[in-house]
Image (tube, helix red, strand yellow):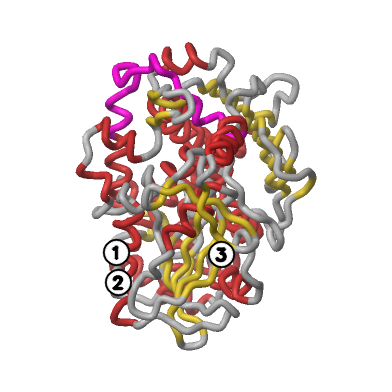
């Protein structure tokens, strides 16, 4: 969540999805009652270090790390939250004071805190004791979150242990101190909410979410024979396709295959955010791919699709809507369709916090695609439309993608050689010179300067730097020769 959204929450009054709590030196005593209630109802946002009236009282800077560690550990402790639901708070400094933001997704399970079930209303959190009220809560979640369907005969042997190990590596890369890392496979799946026991029927076992995340191909197709994600390129051949990937595997591998498919067919332009180089294509399409995998209604036979056209990319997937029509990034309320799957993708670092997708796509698409804006349409079939640079043939798109891939390699090499030698602005300029020379070998300095719109004297100084680093070389007579990348750089 950005600081802008934090400030927007502070301007609101507490409600069923928003809670303020003071936490100067420690977690509030009733914090996990609120977390439990929000998980059981429709999720929400908690701001620690804020009074009930929205005034920031702040958190003691010396206690921030301890409070954050306590919150993460206790959210994974079944005595505080059963079943556990690990949370990751974010710290912001506003008006000179620190506060902590905790995003609470709605859960597909019924949670307890201190052996009691809590629910949420506009008046706050309340304990549920009546058996019929608890049954209503179970029934509501059972009918709304089909990812939690229990398959009592689904065994650990039906899951792919290699994929579980891959997930564990991704979790470690995202957070080396993650509490799940010391668990065996069975404990990991239970803690992640992928094994559950229905307290109404006594039925217990692994869930549909477990099968989708880790199931072997035959396991998934045995449960959902119609399950598929169809990735297509339709630029030259509109009626059929130029390229296709027919995906019917677990969601973790499906994510990789869809991102690889996008990497083959869409270019990625050089971009610096602050002093870090980022991939605009990844920033945008990791959210798009995650959406059609994470927030999809899998019991609906409608296939998910990702289609790349010359002027746009479109996705469509079955959905349980929470409204109908276009989604506004300024006013939308994030609502997970498969909370357990979404939680696991967040732990792996495959997506950021809930609601980040629409914000990130809106932010980076204007840079990636010349001021264009995406369209998200909420309905029984959720649709996303991502405008692209138009009038590109499939062959030219492939050529651009290959060049961009080579440019990425050049960039990494240049940055490594130039580390701590030049400013970011100079490195960007040197990178651009190499890109021009790679695409059009044999240019002289005046042509390079004209192509980049930079003064020729500056270009000549930059060229000398690149020659000293043995990245480019002048070949041929002074009057007719030009600059080329070196054999060392080409290798």
Q: Nearer the viewer, residue 121 or 447?
A: 121
Tell me the residue at 34%/21% (across/down): 159
Q: Choose mark 1 or mark 3, whichever is in front.
A: 1
Which image quarter holds the C terminus?
Answer: top left
Q: Which residue was labeled with disc 3?
A: 447
Looking at the image, residue 287 sits to the left or right of residue 347; the answer is right
Q: Which is more toward the observer, 85 or 253? A: 85
Is 158 contained in the magenta span? yes
Q: Which residues are magenta?
A: 144-165
Residue 124 appears in view: yes
Image mark for residue 69: 1
Q: Is residue 398 above or below residue 37?
A: above
Residue drawn at the location 33% of the way across and 40% of the way down: 191
Quarter-wise, where is residue 156 in the image? top left
| Element marked by disc 1 | helix
Q: Is residue 295 visible?
A: no
Front-lying residue, 163 or 278: 163
Residue 65's label in the rendered image is: 2
Q: Earlier in the sequence, mark 1 or mark 3?
A: 1
Would you say the residues marked 2 and 3 are in contact, meaning their CB atoms lie under 8 Å apart?
no
Q: Of circles 2 and 3, which is in front? A: 2
């Amino acid at each position: 969540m950005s600081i802008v959204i934090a400030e927007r929450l502070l301007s609101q009054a507490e409600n069923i999805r928003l809670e303020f709590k003071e936490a100067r030196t420690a977690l509030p005593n009733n914090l996990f009652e609120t977390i439990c209630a929000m998980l059981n109802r429709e999720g929400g946002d908690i701001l620690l270090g804020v009074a009930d009236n929205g005034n920031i009282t702040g958190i003691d800077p010396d206690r921030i790390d301890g409070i954050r560690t306590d919150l993460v550990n206790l959210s994974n402790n079944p005595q505080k939250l059963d079943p556990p639901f690990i949370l990751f708070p974010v710290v912001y400094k506003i008006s000179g004071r620190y506060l902590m933001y905790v995003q609470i997704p709605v859960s597909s399970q019924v949670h307890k805190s201190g052996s009691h079930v809590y629910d949420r209303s506009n008046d706050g959190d309340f304990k549920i004791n009546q058996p019929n009220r608890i049954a209503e809560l179970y029934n509501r979640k059972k009918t709304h979150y089909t990812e939690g369907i229990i398959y009592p005969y689904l065994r650990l042997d039906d899951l792919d242990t290699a994929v579980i190990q891959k997930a564990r590596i991704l979790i470690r890369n995202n957070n080396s101190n993650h509490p799940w890392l010391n668990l065996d496979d069975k404990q990991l799946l239970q803690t992640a909410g992928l094994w559950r026991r229905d307290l109404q029927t006594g039925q217990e076992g692994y869930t549909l979410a477990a099968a989708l995340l880790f199931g072997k191909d035959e396991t998934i197709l045995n449960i959902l024979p119609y399950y598929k994600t169809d990735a297509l390129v339709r630029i030259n051949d509109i009626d059929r396709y130029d390229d296709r990937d027919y995906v019917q595997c677990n969601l973790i591998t499906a994510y990789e295959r869809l991102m690889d498919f996008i990497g083959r067919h869409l270019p990625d332009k050089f971009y610096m955010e602050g002093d870090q180089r980022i991939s605009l294509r990844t920033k945008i399409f990791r959210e798009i791919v995650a959406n059609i995998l994470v927030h999809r209604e899998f019991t609906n036979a409608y296939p998910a699709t990702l289609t790349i056209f010359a002027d746009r990319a479109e996705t469509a997937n079955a959905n349980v809507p929470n409204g109908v029509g276009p989604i506004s990034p300024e006013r939308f309320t994030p609502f997970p369709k498969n909370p357990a799957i979404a939680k696991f993708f967040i732990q792996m670092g495959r997506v950021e916090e809930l609601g980040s997708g629409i914000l990130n796509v809106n932010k980076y698409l204007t840079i990636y695609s010349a001021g264009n804006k995406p369209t998200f349409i909420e309905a029984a079939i959720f649709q996303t439309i991502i405008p692209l640079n138009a009038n590109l043939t499939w062959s030219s798109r492939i050529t651009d993608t290959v060049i961009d891939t080579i440019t990425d390699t050049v960039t990494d090499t240049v940055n490594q050689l130039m580390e701590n030698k030049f400013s970011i602005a100079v490195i960007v300029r040197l990178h651009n010179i190499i890109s021009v020379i790679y695409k059009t070998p044999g240019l002289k300095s005046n042509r390079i300067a004209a192509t980049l719109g930079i003064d020729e004297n500056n270009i000549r100084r930059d060229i000398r730097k690149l020659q000293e680093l043995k990245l480019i070389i002048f070949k041929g007579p002074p009057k007719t020769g030009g600059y080329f990348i070196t054999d060392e750089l080409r290798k």
